Image: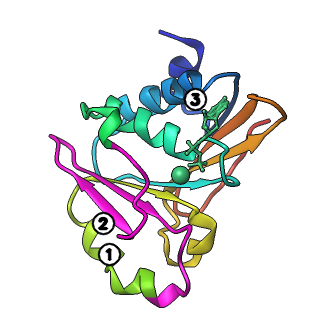
Amino acid sequence: MSEVEHKLHLTVNAISHTTNTPKQTKDIGFILGKTLHGGEVIAITGDLGTGKTHFVQGIGQGLGLVSSEITSPTFALIHEHASLIPLFHIDLYRLESLAEVEAIGLEEYFTRNGVIVIEWAERAMSLLPAKKIAVTILHEGGDKRKITITKNSDNQSETLK
Ligand code: ADP
Ligand code: MG
């Protein structure tokens, strides 16, 4: 079991890990993906080109999907990927108003027992449940990215540095 995998299984609420290649970012997503059971909401924040989509590809792989099929929904707000545990991939980059998110009926997806992953989640944070997995990706120069995964429960949010 890798260090990241080990930490994700602990009761520790947050982990940080630095990656140096797109593949490594995907691998962290993969490890997270394998821990999911359905029903989780994963809110990803991070600037353009930090690797959010690569991370989602890894999550998809962890759920048994083919990662090359996972691309950012550009014209649709949401892509559905059927799997034993379905993946609902949302990208809010082009979002113009919160009403658009309300229109896709997020609540309905929450009841479908899949994994909901949202890129640019900061654009609709107020519409997301308190209980979620928050992923932040920071560009640290060159190909270096710092990925922090925080598990927020209903009434607490702890970040371990
Ligand atoms: P986003 O969805 O955040 O806009 P993408 O995953 O689409 O980002 O693209 C990330 C870009 O950064 C790709 O061109 C990828 O090759 C590059 N890259 C370089 N280093 C990394 C890294 N450590 N992790 C993820 N992507 C990286
Ligand atoms: Mg993207």
Q: Which residue is mark 3?
A: 25
Q: CA distance from mark 3 to mark 2?
A: 26 Å
Q: Say which residue label 1 marks.
A: 107
Q: Position of residue 36 (x, y in %)?
A: 35, 38
Task: Please identify the residue farthest to the right as the structure is shown.
Answer: 141
What label does residue 151 carry, if any? none
- Magenta-tinted stretch: 70-99
Please say if the residues under marks 1 and 3 sit with CB atoms less than 8 Å apart: no
Q: Secondary structure at mark 1?
A: helix
* Residue tagged 2: 110
Judge whether 149 appears above or below 98 on screen.
Answer: above
Residue at the image point whose x is 63% and y is 67% from the top = 122
Q: Given contact means CB atoms under 8 Å apart, are the residues at marks 1 and 2 in contact?
A: yes
- Which quadrant would residue 34 be assigned to in this image? top left
The amino acid type, in three-letter code, at marker 1 is Glu
Q: How far across and down, in percent of the image, does residue 1 sit? A: 47, 9
Residue name at image x 43 percent, y 80 percent: 101
Mark pair 1, 2: CA separation: 5 Å
Q: How is the image coloured?
A: rainbow
Question: Is residue 65 positioned above or below 3 on the image?
Answer: below
Q: Nearer the viewer, residue 35 or 47?
A: 47
Check if mark 3's residue and mark 2's residue have beta carbons within 8 Å.
no
Q: Is mark 3 within 8 Å of ligand 1?
A: yes
Mark 2: amino acid:
Phe
